[in-house]
Image (tube, rainbow, N blue to C red):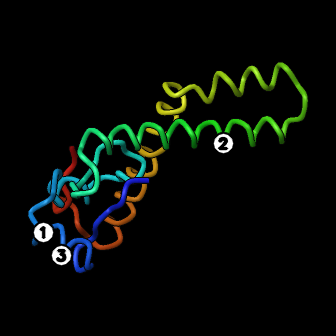
Amino acid sequence: YNVIPFPDTELFAWIEREKRFLVSPESYLNVFLHLSQTPIFETSGMSLSEKKIAFCLAEKASLTVRKNYMKRRTGNNNIKNLILDLLFTNTIYNLIVKVQRYKLFSLLKKVIVGKFNLKGKIHSK
């Protein structure tokens, strides 16, 4: 998962003080980026390219763990296992996650805008 620095936290203050933001807070706070492979801030411990590689490796490991869990749950069924292999390929899984994330974000945005009467105050990309 991507670490999300929120305003009024020690992490946010440190990143701002050290001028290490790679993505502006206005941009990343308007979308859900915890599953994104785009680093939000830089650190001295890892280069930007190392972070991107680490995000990619972590996502592959996560997909493998999820797929293996589902295979154990379905038992020794070759057809179900083949379907799981197809579903958990990186491209298809990412598409499913992005569609679900967009639907969730759109729904939450409608609820928040309606509840707090913020029409026209929250911008979309």
**Residue 16's disc number:** 1
Q: Percent from the top left, x then y, of residue 8?
A: 23, 80
Left or right side of 54 for 78: right
* Residue at the disc numbered 3: 13
Amino acid type, residue under disc 1 in the picture = Glu
| Gap in angstroms between the C-alphas marked 1 and 3 | 5 Å
- Figure check: 70 above or below 116: above
| Gap in angstroms between the C-alphas marked 2 and 1 | 35 Å
Left or right side of 25 for 17: left
**Which residue, as the protein is rendered here, is positioned at the far front?**
45
Q: Percent from the top left, x then y, of residue 51?
A: 32, 45
Packing grade of label 3 (10 A; few <14, some 14-19, many >=20) is: some
| Residue drawn 29% across the image and 43% down it | 38
Is label 1 in contact with label 3 (beta carbons under 8 Å)? yes
Q: Percent from the top left, x then y, of residue 37?
A: 36, 42
Packing grade of label 1 (10 A; few <14, some 14-19, many >=20) is: some
* Residue at the disc numbered 2: 65
Packing grade of label 2 (10 A; few <14, some 14-19, many >=20) is: few
